[in-house]
Image (cartoon, grey):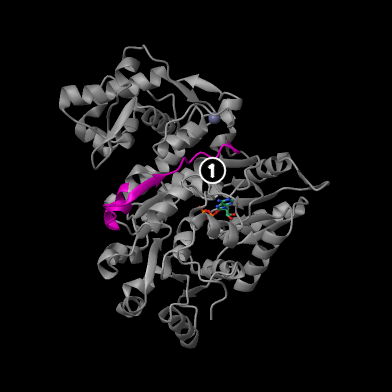
Amino acid sequence: PRTGPDRTGQDPLVVLKEVFGYDAFRGDQADIVAQVVAGGDAVVLMPTGGGKSITYQVPALVRPGTGLVVSPLIALMHDQVDALVANGVNAAFLNSTQSAAERAVVEQAYLAGELDLLYVAPERLSGAATTALLQRGRLSVIAIDEAHCVSQWGHDFRPDYLALGDLAERFPGVPRMALTATATRATHEEITERLHLDDAQHFVASFDRPNIQYRIEAKVDPRRQLLQFIRSVPATTGGGATTSPAGIVYALSRKSVEQTAEYLRGQGVDALAYHAGLDAAMRARHQERFLREEGVVMVATIAFGMGIDKPDVRFVAHIDLPKSIEGYYQETGRAGRDGEPALAWMAYGLGDVVQQRRLIDQSPGDRAYKQRMGQHLDAMLALCETVSCRRQNLLAYFGQASDPCGNCDTCLQPADTWDGLVPAQKLLSTIVRLKRERNQAFGAGHLIDILRGASTDRIRQQKHDTLTTYGLGADLSEQDWRSVVRQLLARGVIAAQGEYGVLAVGDEGAAVLRGEASVPLRRDVLGRSGGGARVRK
Ligand code: ADP
Ligand code: ZN
């Protein structure tokens, strides 16, 4: 039965006010809504918290028929639908957690034209039954949420998304939208192509979150560093009362989540654990406390956070290196959704890098997949190791140019650097000689072996111990060299080419070889400073 009035044909702004209680559309929202209400397709790239939901919910109400929302987040559907119903919207979902009887009720409501919005998991749409059902009723719009899941190269690929490519044929004339908070150029192109959104209008919002201050430091004693950080986060003041700030701490493993939460509790922080290994009731209880109470710190794996709408999260901390910039950006984006100042803090170390490289090596994916994952990791490390503005770096990754922000650690306190000109020249001249004298090119590993004067089979076979640069870089450890290589890659002094990622002289390389460019490298990264080099057990 209908819970609210039929809004078909109403002015979108009136619907926004009366149903959702907002005074005005924000950013691109009005244009996106207009495009879809008029029957056009849209690709929407907007950061987390940008307000994507409104852009399909309003058209779904205004256009005749039911808006179909494809979302992989089954666990959240219930909450989303409840919130909509509370606003007088006729929303329902179909997913695997329901009984056949529950599903039948929803299906009948849909066919009777009573639903404004219907949420489904992508796997429902790979089956013929759901398609047949939906074809018997009327759809107003199809919104594909978390659309980056269609990208096989992305950080969150879900095979069921590939079946969404033919929705236009299955539901001709129904406007389609793809929405995501992941905005690299490659993902953007892949979404457009795989979902066949050739005629769509594209809306790309700025990915800057100016109220979030980014800080990244080398791991020395991660728990103490974390505690120190949490204690440094300003208390929240509101309504005359002062409360300790709410935050999320991300760790990679369940064990680390548990231990960190316990440690923080021992230090007087109201910390709770959250990971997939806890039973559902405890997870729900912890999530509930985090959402409803003030000043709760959730220590969690990345299983926590998708779709969590808590506007006053004051900090997000990472005590392990995220796997990709996309992931890091999404996780840190959960801080400060209310627009008030918030902090994104991370500690990373050599152990993280070693562990993640091993995970990539041991993963079942093919070579191209592993290489892609390696590139994700390298980009993440480049952000950690940059001597310039973190935000500028982050936004550049998403294809958006910007000026130094003045609100990140390297802007506020310039990084301690050392002069990397000489090592850069040694590396470059090794690359140049191999190319000129032997027409050869190699990846970072072998070049570092040459510079460090290693005696490997390959070096002996290739007689690379006769090169003039052989052993010239023995003053730096292998890890130092890896860091140097990453930093040089990040600034275009060298470039990685082809399938195997062999190194070549980059656009900035010639000036460095001539000694005309300075090459400041971070001192605090990985092996260089004493503490940063410790490997976690
Ligand atoms: P996203 O899905 O892009 O992460 P949401 O749709 O969940 O973002 O919206 C984020 C927050 O912004 C929510 O709390 C939502 O209620 C709020 N919001 C969205 N649009 C508006 C608007 N036009 N005016 C005020 N608040 C809005
Ligand atoms: Zn900055």
Q: Is residue 434 magenta?
A: no
Residue pushed farthest bottom? 101
Picture coordinates of residue 251, whole percent (x, y): 57, 52
Residue holding disc 1: 535
* Dot 1 crowding, Cα within 10 Å, few <14, some 14–19, many 20+: some
User: From what the image shows, is residue 396 above or below residue 65?
Assistant: above
Specify the segment rendered in magenta: 189-214
Q: Residue at x 78, y 46 (%)?
A: 238
Q: Residue at x 56, y 28 (%)?
A: 410
Q: How many marks?
A: 1
Which one is in front, 211 or 39? Answer: 39
Residue pushed farthest right? 240
**Mark 1 within 8 Å of ligand 2, using the beta carbon:** no
User: In which quadrant of the rendered view does residue 290 lie?
Assistant: bottom right
Which one is in front, 499 or 187? Answer: 187
User: In which quadrant of the rendered view does residue 284 lie?
Assistant: bottom right
Picture coordinates of residue 207, whole percent (x, y): 48, 41
User: From what the image shows, is residue 324 above or below residue 149?
Assistant: above
Q: Is residue 207 magenta?
A: yes
Of the four image quadrants, the one with ligand 2 is top right
Which one is in front, 144 or 54? Answer: 54
Q: Is residue 199 left or right of residue 297?
A: left
Q: Is residue 187 visible?
A: no
Indicate the secondary structure of the residue bearing disc 1.
loop
User: Tag 1: residue type?
Assistant: Val
Picture coordinates of residue 51, whole percent (x, y): 52, 52
Picture coordinates of residue 460, whole percent (x, y): 24, 33
